[in-house]
Amino acid sequence: MLKKIWANALLLALLLPMAARADEGMWLPMLVKRLNYADMQKKGLQLTAEEIYDINNASLKDAVVQLGGFCTGEFVSGQGLLLTNHHCGYDAIQSHSTPEKNLLADGFFAANKSEEKPNPGLFVDILVRMEDVTGKVLEGITPQTPEQERAALVQQRQKQLADAAKENGQYVAYVRDFFAGNEYYMFVYQRFGDVRLVGAPPESVGKFGGDTDNWMWPRHTGDFSMFRVYASKDNKPTTGYVADNVPYVPKKHLPVSLQGVSEGDFAMVFGFPGRTQRFLPAAGLQLTLDQSNPARIKLRDTRLKLWKEDMDADPALRLKYASKYASIANYWKYFIGQNEGMKRLKTVDKKKAEEAQFAQWIAADPARQQLYGSALQDINQNYTALREFNLSNVYLNEAAFGTEIMTFAARMLPLHSLLKDPNADKAAIQKATADLKEPAAEFFKDYSATTDKKVFAALMGLYYTDVPKSQHPEVFQTVAKQYGGSMKKYADYVFGNTFLTSPTKLNAFLAAPTLAKLEADPAFKTMNSVYTNYVQKIAPQLQASQATMSRANRQYVAGLRAKNTDRVYSPDANSTLRLSYGTVRPYEGRDAVSYDYQTTGKGILEKEDPTNPEFVVPAKQVALLKSKDFGPYANKDGQLPVAFITDNDITGGNSGSPVINGRGELIGLAFDGNWEAMTGDLAYDPDLKRCINVDIRYVLFCVDKLGGAKHLVDEMTVVNKGPNPGVGTSAYATSSQVNGTDEAGKMKTKSPAAGKVKIKKKKNKEKAEANAEM
């Protein structure tokens, strides 16, 4: 009977989206035609579904790439020219900077392709296809299948499917679970490993507003950088830089629009959102609010303050630590905003109310009780158990791994395992040793032992005092007995005796590694103690509840989808290609505070403060703004557009994503979310959630007028020039003219006269939408 109930429930889940309407979400492009297309047309889309996603012909999916596994980029020319955010290219820009030639501070645009700078390790993935493999992964699996057996079968099948799709290394492929393991999709990519830096504005433009403006609206940040993807002469990917490589010719690149945006205009964001947790139960939200986020905020705040003290005192150190600081600071502020938002919006209470309704729905039907009856009880019991060990997990990641020497020491663990094994193959030891040499060089390039020692003492000191003593690693007993509990004194010992702070000493060890010498090193000994403690004490406790939690989460999500038949749920983000759609839209941030949907260069001058590094404006930009020398990039009112907001659903990983209008043209780059909706990864708020985008016209202004690199604008396909002052018939060469490609890959669009959907505008939209999580 239960098997029949399960089969009927699965069939219902597959059929539900056909009849339901989608409101918000990060959608799989392959399902857009079935789930979203009619709604997108109503909002102003003029493309066909096939022009968005097609595996047999060029479509928008071919113009969008995952950059380095952490950001999104888009092709804007037929010569592989790629746009992304400044903060996505920050590490690459910093790596090419020196105190004498500081590209980060001064900006950089390659005058020709020979000046474009290689970036070892940086890659882009271009989607070839995605496929629903749910049936293949779950074949023969029923609710009666033991969880451990189910997990093993699923993992085995995921690997088999991905390995077959790789076609002997020709592609990168993986299978990801969706809806807590109720569905599975496979993604196949081409990976290009030769990605070169083409240009970026000065940091004072690309990061204008700094930490103060981060996650805030209004914004005036020129958050963009430019790269170029290179390929072999037959347009195939290479694993890294090859001198003879040539610019990659993409199947599709985006035309760039100068028409600009108006309130109510259609906007689509295409990219690789990192992670959302909108099915997280109330107990999980409460743990995040009470324990996880406060610990992360405390530990990151401590690290950032210590870094900043030394960075402010030493310009060379500031350059070394610029990228690391920006990365940690970004989510430090995010965690603060998320907690404030959860309290303000009563996110936990809303989830509890949803769970109460879910429990009532289950209780009303014996069949539902069989399928979903124990889900919430199991979830709550597991979170109660998890709470006891959660801090140890957070402090391992934020305190132990928040110290640079500890992070590098962890890289020595595989070598340590081999050295301990009397039967270990010598070739394996040699390979493990060789594999450490490149990371070591990268580590020391941007490292200060003096600064790291301060951080070690502070963060490990908090680890020592904040985590229950019963969960302490053994090394903390040494700190207590030999150093009176003073982590500062212990730090003096560690940094005074380790070989991991010296390139010379480390290389000497790697030339002749021995177990005795590695285990005697105090930095490695500390890391090994922390790691061993986690593996032996903490991980088993966390894993003990994992099987029950996985099953309960899967039942809970399946039950929600079966209960709410009038709603199409989009899956949580998991770094796979997604599409979100919406409109250009202002918002009311709080009582009596209303925000417009766009900013202009006027705001840059209003924020300018030469005494504050976050709000310095380059002299050349000041002159251009004051003289209103905007070239063809002004709006219809003669102002320079800088940024705009939409109600698109985005998260981390969407940084650099193209914002595309109804005709398939690039109008901006997504780069941030707004403070009032920092709970967006946990719960979507349709009234407050906004996507902050740099206007493509400001990008082109910074490249052309500020950066003097008009040749890069000329390489793009610039369209819709007529309506803007000063544009007229300005002759920007299309990429097809530049590289001789034909028009086959160009986007088909309907003319505005033939197919434009009129959008009713309403300044203060009635707030009647449900505040629901995905």
Image: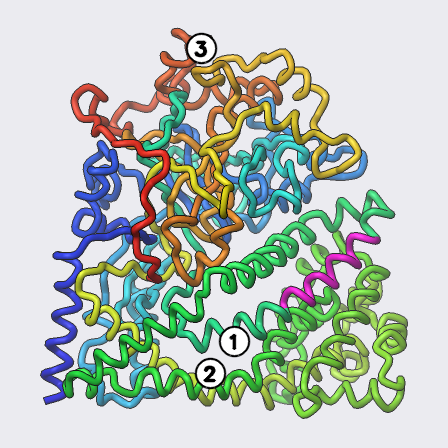
Report the residue at 78% width, 46% height from top: 318
The local crowd at label 3, few if under 14, some if 14 to 19, many if 20 or more residues have their Cα within 10 Å, is: some
The residue carrying mark 2 is 383
How far across and how far down the image is residue 90, in percent? Answer: 62, 43
CA separation in Å, label 1 and label 3: 54 Å
- Give the residue type that dot 2 points to: Tyr
Quadrant into which the N terminus falls: bottom left
* Residue 202 visible within the image: yes
Quadrant into which the C terminus falls: bottom left
How far across and how far down the image is residue 555, in percent? Answer: 28, 79
- Give the residue type that dot 1 points to: Leu
The residue carrying mark 1 is 287
| Span shown in magenta | 296-309
Cβ atoms at labels 1 and 3 below 8 Å apart: no
Q: Earlier in the sequence, mark 3 or mark 2?
A: 2
Q: Earlier in the sequence, mark 1 or mark 2?
A: 1
Query: Where is 510 relative to 171, above or below?
Result: below
Report the residue at 44% width, 70% height from top: 348
Cβ atoms at labels 1 and 2 below 8 Å apart: yes
For the residue labelled by badge 3, is the local secondary structure a helix, a strand or a loop? loop
The residue carrying mark 3 is 725
Report the residue at 12% width, 82% height from top: 5
In the visual, does 705 lie left or right of 468? left
Quarter of the image for residue 509 reads bottom right
In the visual, does 621 lie left or right of 385? right
Q: 573 and 443: which one is in front?
A: 573
In the visual, does 333 lie left or right of 256? right
Q: 282 and 514: which one is in front?
A: 282
For the residue labelled by badge 2, is the local secondary structure a helix, a strand or a loop? helix
Query: Where is 115 relative to 774, above or below?
Result: above
